[in-house]
Image (tube, helix red, strand yellow):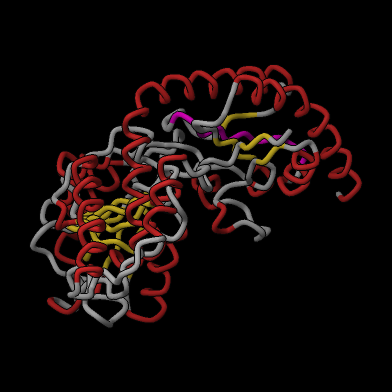
């Protein structure tokens, strides 16, 4: 029996999304074509756009479909930065949290290396929430030099939920972007209520297909595009519409939002049960970060290595991760855990169990049953290697 505890990496596709994807794939037509076949596909895309907008509290015209969340983050970071420096070359500071996903960190680093940007990271407190006092003081002192602020809505490794509305209040006229791919369908996320300038969401994090996401960009704003072509999506993101995936994205989001409150309670209880049982079975293990997202559980197991733990769990039929799937396979400590004050050794001995709609009580019981043996074997290997 396979037990999947890596929902933060990708969520199993829900039946409604699979059905919508399959049906739309059989419909011929390019949504940019003017003939009736093209117009029919375009209507399906626009209906999906409207459906998503109603679910997340934005205007339909504010949704820009992209291929991935990474693409949407790049669009926001680079687009806002280029806009800012074009208007005022001295406005070149990008503020971001110390625990951003690499989809935000890496384009910022690229802009530092290639385009004269200055990167300032907002530190986080012990629970993984950003230091608002640092942000407030920095913005007050450097307001005229800041191009944009990017603070993720919730963290993919430790589950910490950030006070994004307060960030917006501090920012004032400075654009604020939030990566919300982990939040949609799990906790309350409303674009208009948050007041952010832009936000990123992604289909496969809510039970939709891979290969489609969206940048939500406040109406009336234009940002410098990263790619150029046919001018689709407000001339911000050119490219042929992936109509089947867009339609399926809307269906998945609808299902996720319908079940969100009930699933939040159920999954939170499972996570808390797992944490209690694991810490009881392995007393020197320790939790990383405070509970925020319902399904994220990040635990350090001293005198082990994450890679060995993952392989041993996999041999027991349990899928987990050592952090972000986008940086999987790279043997380096998590920058998120380092930002919490963990040592490199602690960060390299940590696992993330991410629970979701398919997770059951039996799954957690099986994890708790095999984990002591897995940790014992990983420690034996670690002592030999050391």
Question: Residue at 14% across / 57% down in the picture?
Answer: 61
Whether residue 284 appears in this view of the structure is: no
Toward the left, the furthest residue is 220
Q: Is residue 10 above or below residue 62?
A: above
What is the total number of numbered labels drawn onto the structure image? 0
Q: Is residue 126 above or below residue 224?
A: above
Which x, y percent locates residue 288?
55, 34
Q: Quadrant of residue 383?
A: top right
Question: Residue at 23% across / 42% down in the picture?
Answer: 56
Which x, y percent locates residue 192?
15, 43
Which x, y percent locates residue 167?
23, 45
Q: Is residue 372 magenta?
A: no
Q: Quadrant of residue 184?
A: top left
Q: Is residue 17 above or below residue 243?
A: above
256, 324: nearer the viewer? 256
Query: Quadrant location of the N terminus?
Result: top right
Which x, y percent locates residue 294?
45, 29
Residues rendered magenta in the picture: 294-304
- Left or right: 209 in relation to 277: left
339, 111: nearer the viewer? 111
Q: Quadrant of residue 142?
A: bottom left
Q: Is residue 299 magenta?
A: yes
- Left or right: 312 in relation to 319: right
């Amino acid at each position: 029996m396979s037990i999947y505890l890596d929902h933060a990496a990708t969520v199993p596709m829900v039946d409604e999304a699979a059905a919508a994807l399959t049906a739309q794939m059989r419909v011929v037509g390019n949504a940019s074509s003017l003939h009736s076949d093209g117009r029919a596909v375009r209507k399906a895309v626009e209906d999906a756009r409207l459906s998503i907008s109603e679910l997340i509290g934005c205007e339909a015209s504010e949704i820009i479909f992209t291929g991935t969340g990474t693409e949407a983050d790049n669009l926001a970071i680079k687009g806002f930065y280029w806009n800012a420096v074009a208007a005022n070359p001295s406005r070149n500071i990008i503020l971001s949290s110390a625990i951003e996903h690499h989809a935000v960190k890496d384009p910022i680093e690229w802009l530092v290396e290639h385009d004269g940007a200055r990167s300032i990271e907002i530190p986080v407190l012990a629970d993984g929430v950003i230091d608002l006092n640092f942000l407030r003081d920095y913005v007050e002192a450097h307001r005229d030099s800041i191009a944009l602020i990017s603070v993720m809505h919730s963290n993919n490794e430790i589950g910490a939920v950030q006070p994004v509305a307060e960030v917006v209040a501090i920012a004032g006229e400075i654009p604020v972007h939030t990566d919300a791919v982990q939040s949609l369908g799990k906790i309350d996320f409303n674009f208009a209520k948050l007041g952010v300038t832009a936000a990123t969401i992604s289909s496969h994090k809510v039970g939709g297909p891979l290969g489609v996401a969206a940048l939500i960009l406040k109406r009336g704003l234009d940002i410098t595009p990263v790619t150029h072509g046919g001018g689709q999506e407000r001339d911000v993101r050119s490219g042929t519409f992936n109509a089947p995936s867009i339609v399926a994205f809307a269906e998945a989001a609808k299902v996720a939002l319908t079940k969100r409150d009930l699933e939040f309670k159920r999954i939170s209880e499972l996570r808390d049960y797992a944490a209690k049982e694991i810490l009881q079975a392995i007393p020197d293990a320790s939790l990383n970060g405070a509970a925020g997202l319902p399904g994220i559980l990040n635990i350090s197991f001293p005198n082990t290595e994450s890679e060995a733990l993952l392989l041993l769990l996999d041999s027991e039929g349990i899928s987990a991760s050592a952090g972000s799937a986008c940086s999987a396979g790279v043997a380096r400590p998590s920058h998120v855990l380092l930002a919490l004050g963990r040592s490199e050794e602690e960060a390299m001995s940590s696992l993330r169990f991410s629970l979701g709609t398919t997770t059951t009580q039996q799954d957690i019981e099986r994890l708790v049953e095999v984990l002591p043996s897995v940790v014992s074997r990983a420690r034996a290997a670690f002592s030999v290697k050391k």
